[in-house]
Every structure is written in C-alpha cells, then in structure tokens.
C-alpha cells in the first residue's frame, strides 16, 4: 500500500531513543544459546529479524523467555534437529543459525522469504561441509545433517558477506578441536562486524587469536553465560541524525555509547565530512545541520549498511558523492546498488553504479515520486530522507521496516512533526 512520507517545512529538531542493535542482539542470543548456563539480556531489539532468531533457537531446543526488551536464554543439553526453520530475509539468521544446527542431534531444514534464495549462502555452507556436515543445496532452502566427526579447519571466500566468518566463529569453541578459519578472498567487507563477534566471544571467556588479517583461531572450550545489555542500533540511529543534517536542524540520539564496535558509529565521521557539526556529551550524541551539505568521496567498506542513508545525503548535497567499497551489498536484502540508482533517477537525481559503489551528483530538477522499497528496510530510510527535501515522496511498502525497527513510521513522524 502506497504511503506518503513527511516533508520537513522547518528544521528538524528533537531527541530520539533508538532500539537495540540488531547485530549485537542476534549475536548475544546465539552466544547465550551456546553457553554453559542461562543468560539474561536487556535492551533486546524487538523486530522481525530478532523474532526470527528467537524462533530458530527455540526450534533447535533452546529455552528463550521474553518480556519486551528483556530475554532469558537457557541452552539445551543437546541441540535438536528442526524442520523448516524460517530465516525470513534476515542475514544473521540464515548465516548464524545453520552452524548451531550442525551441533544438533539430527538434521535441520532452512527456508526463507521468496527473495531469500537470492542472498549468498554457498561460502558458509561450504564451510560447514569442510567441518563434516552434509548439506543439501547452496542457497535457501537447504538441509543440514550433523557430521559423524567434526573437522577443525575451514577456508572460504567471505567477500560477499562478513557474516560467513562470524557464523563460523560463533560455534568454534564448541567444536572438539576448536576452529582455524581462513578467508581466501581479496576483499573482506564489514570488518567491524567480525571484530564485534570476536570481542563478544572473548567477553565470554573464549580464546580467539588472529595470527594475520585473514585468519582466526578459536580454541575449544566453554562459552561462559553472561548477562548483557544491548547497545542502541547506531546504523538505525543514522537516519534520524541525517534528518538534522539535511534540514539545518538539531537531532540527538540518547544512549549513544562512548565506544562501540558497531560500524554505524562511523556515520558521525561521514556526516561531519559533509558539513554538519557533531557534539558528544555523556550518553548522547547530537548532529547540528549547518547550511548546505557538500558531496564527498567515502569508502563505506567497513560500514556498508550506511550506504542508503549516505546516498540520500549525497543526492541532496552540492557536488558529487562517490561511495566505494560496497560491491557486496548487491547481495543484501535486494541489490541495493541497483535499487538506489533506480530510485534516485526516479526523482531526477543523476546517479550511476561503479564497480564497487555509487556516483551521485546532487541537486538537479528533483520531482515527486512513489519510491519502491524492494522489501528492504534501508530503502525506506533512504526514501524518508529524500522526502524531507522533495515534497510529494511516498513509499510503496513501509511495513518492511519491521525487519529491524517496527516503530520507525511513528517515531519518524513524531520527530518530523
């Protein structure tokens, strides 16, 4: 159903509380399921992606009790095989749950949304095969049978997704001889997400060594139960902060951590380089818009999820914005590079794909349009930002934001006024 998006008739000002990090939530849930005892998690993201992860773990025999943003997770004595685990369109579920299923007492099947079969899976599934699992299929749907004997060494090309590395690292300590994992490709996207995985393992007593930039060694041993509080999702926060930059306003995000491994934290450097001002205080970060934004050249290889928001800023900035290092987002919820170029051109922006990103010339004769979401939550954020400055922008599917931020429509309307 088509839905108009708010236009900003004045500078956007306000304060926002952003829900918990999807990346940290789903890693914490998996680690709690693999731990030696029960764990309590606070700040858990309430979204479709996290609900799918909880359902997947429950299907594998894990006890997960939820109360709003709190969860109590109790691991099973032995994981159970499960039929038709639904991954939706969630990369963390389709890449983190199958390695856990390899530890089960029987086979498991995995299914997903119609477009889920387009998301890359083969390197992860090849990694499970190298560990001894029997895997039928290279994309969703597929089936995994646990090995008779577990291997300890994997070499895969994770150029299409850092989640292939993270998914295997999460179970490394539970393998009888641990895990030595090597990335064989030339490019490794979203490295901070791998660093997050390694840091969360170490916080739970797991030895994770990195002898070089493309090799990880996880020692066999227990994963300690740990009560934890999830940080706000800094990538989701970026769309609210960008509203201030685009309209000359002032928006604060409450609960911004002093230090974070989330790639979304890099947005502050990006928006500053485009001409906005950023201030930090205890537990809060604020972006102050300061007139027109300037186009930039930026490598988002470490934080590719920011690409739609930065593309929207570039479309409304002066000059040319070139985004590089994000070739792998062609395999995200949709081909994000193609989708962004199509929708930018729909409103009159000069945009084109490069080998590993986008080139966007800001300004031009911009026009109203109903934009397509492609079942991709980030495309809704992109459209919402364009609508602030281009009157008459709508979106054909706002409901897909439930993937990571179900309250986005009401929170956005409340901020924009």
Image (spheres, grey):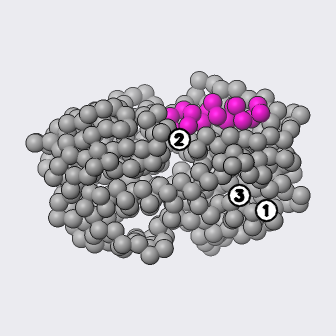
CA–CA distance between discs 1 and 2? 27 Å
In this rendering, the answer to whether 352 lies above or below 193 is above
The disc at residue 241 is 3
| Residue 335 on the magenta segment | yes
Residue 292, horizontal then vertical, whole percent: 85, 47
CA–CA distance between discs 2 and 3? 23 Å
Which is more toward the observer, 67 or 151?
67
Quarter of the image for the C terminus: give it. bottom right
Which is more toward the observer, 274 or 122?
122
Category of crowding for the residue at label 3, using alpha-carbon neighbours closer than 10 angstroms: few (below 14), some (14–19), many (at least 20) = many
Range covered by the magenta-colored residues: 330-346
Residue 385, horizontal then vertical, whole percent: 75, 50
- Magenta stretch: dominant secondary structure: helix
The disc at residue 333 is 2
Q: Secondary structure at mark 2?
A: loop
Which is more toward the observer, 147 or 201?
147
Outermost residue to the top = 355
Q: Quadrant of residue 80?
A: bottom left
Residue 311, horizontal then vertical, whole percent: 70, 40
Q: Are marks 2 and 3 in contact (CB under 8 Å)?
A: no
Residue 22, horizontal then vertical, whole percent: 49, 57
Q: Secondary structure at mark 1?
A: helix
N-term mark: 1 or 3:
3
Category of crowding for the residue at label 2, using alpha-carbon neighbours closer than 10 angstroms: few (below 14), some (14–19), many (at least 20) = many
N-term mark: 1 or 2:
2
Category of crowding for the residue at label 1, using alpha-carbon neighbours closer than 10 angstroms: few (below 14), some (14–19), many (at least 20) = many
Which residue is located at x 24 percent, y 70 percent? Answer: 37
In the picture of the structure, the residue carrying the numbered disc 1 is: 416
Q: Secondary structure at mark 3?
A: helix
Which residue is located at x 61 percent, y 47 percent? Answer: 378
Tag nearer the camera, 1 or 3: 1
């Amino acid at each position: 159903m088509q839905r108009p998006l708010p236009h900003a008739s004045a500078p956007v000002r306000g304060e926002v509380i952003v829900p918990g990090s999807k990346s940290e939530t789903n890693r914490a849930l998996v680690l709690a399921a693999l731990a030696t005892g029960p764990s309590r998690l606070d700040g858990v993201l309430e979204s479709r992606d996290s609900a799918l992860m909880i359902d997947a773990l429950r299907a594998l025999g894990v006890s997960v009790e939820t109360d709003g943003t709190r969860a109590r997770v109790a691991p099973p004595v032995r994981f159970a095989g499960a039929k038709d685990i639904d991954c939706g369109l969630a990369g963390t579920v389709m890449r983190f749950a199958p390695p856990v299923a390899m530890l089960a007492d029987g086979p498991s099947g995995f299914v997903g949304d119609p477009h889920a079969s387009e998301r890359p899976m083969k390197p992860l599934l090849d990694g499970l095969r190298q560990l001894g699992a029997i895997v039928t299929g290279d994309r969703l749907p597929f089936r995994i049978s646990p090995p008779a004997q577990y291997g300890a060494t994997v070499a895969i090309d994770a150029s299409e997704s850092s989640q292939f590395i993270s998914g295997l690292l999460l179970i490394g300590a539970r393998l009888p001889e641990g895990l030595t994992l090597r990335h064989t490709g030339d490019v490794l996207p979203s490295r901070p997400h791998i660093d997050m995985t390694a840091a969360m393992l170490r916080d739970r007593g797991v030895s994770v060594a990195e002898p070089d930039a493309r090799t990880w060694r996880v020692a066999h041993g227990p994963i300690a139960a740990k009560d934890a509080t999830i940080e706000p999702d800094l990538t989701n926060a970026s769309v609210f902060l960008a509203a201030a930059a685009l309209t000359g306003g002032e928006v604060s995000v409450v609960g911004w951590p002093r230090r974070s491994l989330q790639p979304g934290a890099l947005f502050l450097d990006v928006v500053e380089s485009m001409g906005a001002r950023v201030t930090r205080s205890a537990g809060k970060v604020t972006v102050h818009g300061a007139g027109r934004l300037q186009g930039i050249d930026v490598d988002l290889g470490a934080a590719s999820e920011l690409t739609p928001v930065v593309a929207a800023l570039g479309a409304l900035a002066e000059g040319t914005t070139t985004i590089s290092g994000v070739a792998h987002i062609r395999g995200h919820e949709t081909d994000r590079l193609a989708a962004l170029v199509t929708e930018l051109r729909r409103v009159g922006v000069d945009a084109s794909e490069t080998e590993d990103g986008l080139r966007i010339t800001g300004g031009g004769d911009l026009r109203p349009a109903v934009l397509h979401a492609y079942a991709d939550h980030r495309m809704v954020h992109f459209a919402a930002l364009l609508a602030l400055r281009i009157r008459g922008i709508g979106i054909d599917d706002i409901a897909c934001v439930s993937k990571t931020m179900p309250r986005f429509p009401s929170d956005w309307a409340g901020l924009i006024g």
